[in-house]
Amino acid sequence: MRFAFLTYAPPDDPLVWSGTPVYILRALVRAGHEIVNVGPLGPRYPLRERIKSRLYRHFKQRNYIINREPAVFRARGALASRLLGSIEPVDAVIAAYPPDIAFVETTLPIVLIHDATWNQLLDFYPEFSTHRLAPETVAGGHLLERLALRNATRLLYFTRWAADSAVGDYGVAPEKVDIALPGANLDDPPRRDEVEYSVREMRGRGACRLLFIGKDWLRKGGDVAVQIVSELRKLEIDAELVAVGSRPPTSRSLPSFVKFAGFLDKADPDDARALRHLLLSSDFFLMPTRAECAGLVFCEAAAHGVPSLSTDVGGVSELIATGAMGTTLPLEADPMQYARWIAQAYRDRSRYERLALGARQRFESVLNWGSFTHALAATVERAANDLLQQRGSLVLQE
């Protein structure tokens, strides 16, 4: 099939949504599909809105988000509509950011891919606290979300958690929504035999290594992770926490069992190798996140056969199938609850190997972009059929 990918941002930018669009497009091409990029749509940050953002920040101590301003996407939508009308025929339009399609006019089926709705982000992620956002941003975000979900022919969400919000919070018909788990954003995942070797020969020797990855120390639960490892050591397990990507926001000292590996850029070959080694040699992936829509890093841990522990927030528990590749605990869970689970799994080597190899199996079966794009192609076919039926109904009504 031939797809038009619509985006306000450069489609090959690895910083946009943690590089997720990049990996989806690559997987589509590997599956034999053709991609026509429509974008980036500009202007990305118009002068009027930039001035408005500064005024809000300096005089009202509020954040005005340009990418939730309807006027900006009305202009981008007009441009996108013209561009879609000028390209050679495609089977469908794919978008990965709801506002991008809010004002698009096309006869083509539109499929929107995402991991949450605007309503779910509000007062969930710290930066989307309604106490910190400009009222215009809150209202504009809701308007753009409603228009986008209405304009999309079909919606493909990473989790049931997100899909339920589209239906419950924005009135989307349930039959319009599909679900497909996301994949690991890895250029070169390890082979299965590498994972099996690491599980049986590299782990369980020396200190129990727990790996934490996250740019936002507090939101990702870095402080909680330190407490968990501290409790684990009280259970007489020699354990260390290796943190990648962030440090605590304060200069306070941390226990000696916390090691910092710094920021590792997967686009850099040396950093990618270092991250790969850390994953293969870690006994558990620990990210007791306070807020998370899905968490693609759990897919990456699974690719390396590393059992994951996290909190049951957002759609995380749908990625980490408890018992199959790790576990999730309630947000209010005590650090000792995590520590006891880790200690039991770590000491029972047969159980540990089942969890580790189960994580790898889950990566191979569902937590990969090949599986996702297969589901996406099926969603596109359903979208095309939906559009034909809608047009048929309109003809009968006339």
Image: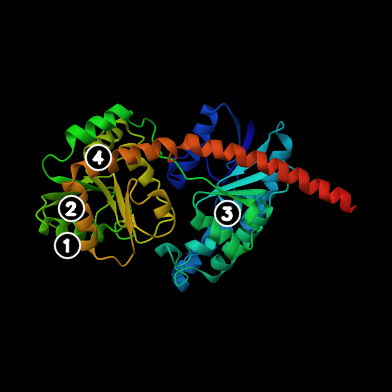
Please tell me which of labels 4 and 1 falls first in the chain.
1
Residue 190, visible in the rendered structure: yes
Residue 67 at x, y percent in the picture: 54, 56
Residue indicated by mark 4: 353
What is the crowding at mark 4: few (fewer than 14 residues within 10 Å), some, or many (at least 20)? many
Please tell me which of labels 4 and 3 falls first in the chain.
3
Circle 4: residue type: Glu
Residue 94 at x, y percent in the picture: 61, 42
- In three-dimensional space, the C-alpha distance between marks 4 and 2, rounded to whole angstroms, equals 14 Å
- Which residue is at 51% across, 54% downward? 160
Residue indicated by mark 1: 252
What is the crowding at mark 3: few (fewer than 14 residues within 10 Å), some, or many (at least 20)? few
What is the crowding at mark 1: few (fewer than 14 residues within 10 Å), some, or many (at least 20)? few
Secondary structure of the residue carrying tag 4 is: helix
- In three-dimensional space, the C-alpha distance between marks 4 and 1, rounded to whole angstroms, equals 37 Å
Secondary structure of the residue carrying tag 3 is: loop
Residue indicated by mark 2: 343
Circle 3: residue type: Pro
User: How is the protein colored in the picture?
Assistant: rainbow
Residue indicated by mark 3: 46
Observer-side mark, 1 or 2, equals 2
Q: Are marks 4 and 2 in contact (CB under 8 Å)?
A: no
Please tell me which of labels 2 and 3 falls first in the chain.
3
Residue 128 at x, y percent in the picture: 45, 64
Between 267 and 383, which is closer to the camera in this rendering?
A: 383
Observer-side mark, 2 or 3, equals 2
> In which quadrant is the N terminus drawn?
top right
- Horizontal side, residue 275 vs residue 375: left or right: left
Q: Are marks 1 and 2 in contact (CB under 8 Å)?
A: no
